[in-house]
Image (cartoon, rainbow, N blue to C red):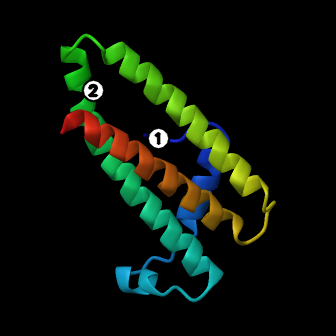
Amino acid sequence: MHLRGPHIRVAALAAALLPASLSAQDCANPVTQIDMNACAQIAWQQSDATLNQLWARAKPLADQMGLGAQLLDSQRAWLSYRDAACGFEQAVFGGGSIAPMVYSNCMKRLTDRRNEDLRGMVN
């Protein structure tokens, strides 16, 4: 599910700063803060891709049960919660170099939890 509000600027900036040749092997043991930030962003993007795949399966099932609108409402509320919670976690670090990693780690953690919820709906 995609970002809204001021967090889109943070994610866009972080994506622009990703090293072009960063590999999975590099993310196994990142050394610099820039690499740590980039690896956290990549991990979150992978979780977000899974979320979108699960949503594409869960929403039609909920629609078939007449619960599609409720699921959509819950997803919108969850997105608002996730964005606010991770915005807060990032704000604690001000504009520090670790802030993008904190934000991406939070987004991944909360997205992974939502993925488990959606997996339970489609399995």
Quarter residue 17 falls in? bottom right
Which residue is under mark 2?
59
Front residue of 78/41: it is: 78
Query: Residue at (34%, 46%) from the top-left corner?
Result: 116
Query: Residue at (46%, 59%) from the top-left corner?
Result: 44
> Looking at the image, do the residues carrying marks 2 and 1 touch, with CB atoms under 8 Å apart?
no
Asked which secondary structure carries label 2, the reply is helix
Q: Which mark is residue 2?
A: 1
Which residue ends up furthest to the top in the rendered image? 66
Mark earlier in primary sequence (2, 1) = 1
Task: Look at the image and tell me in which quarter the N terminus lies.
Answer: top left
Task: Look at the image and tell me in which quarter the C terminus lies.
Answer: top left
Measuring from the top left, give residue 35's x and y in whole percent.
55, 80
Q: Nearer the viewer, mark 2 or mark 1?
A: 2
Front residue of 44/115: it is: 115
Measuring from the top left, give residue 79's x and y in whole percent.
52, 35
Measuring from the top left, give residue 70's x and y in whole percent.
39, 16
- Note whether 45 is above or below 62 in the view shown: below
Query: Residue at (25%, 10%) from the top-left corner?
Result: 66
Query: Residue at (36%, 79%) from the top-left corner?
Result: 24
| Alpha carbon distance from label 2 to label 1 | 16 Å
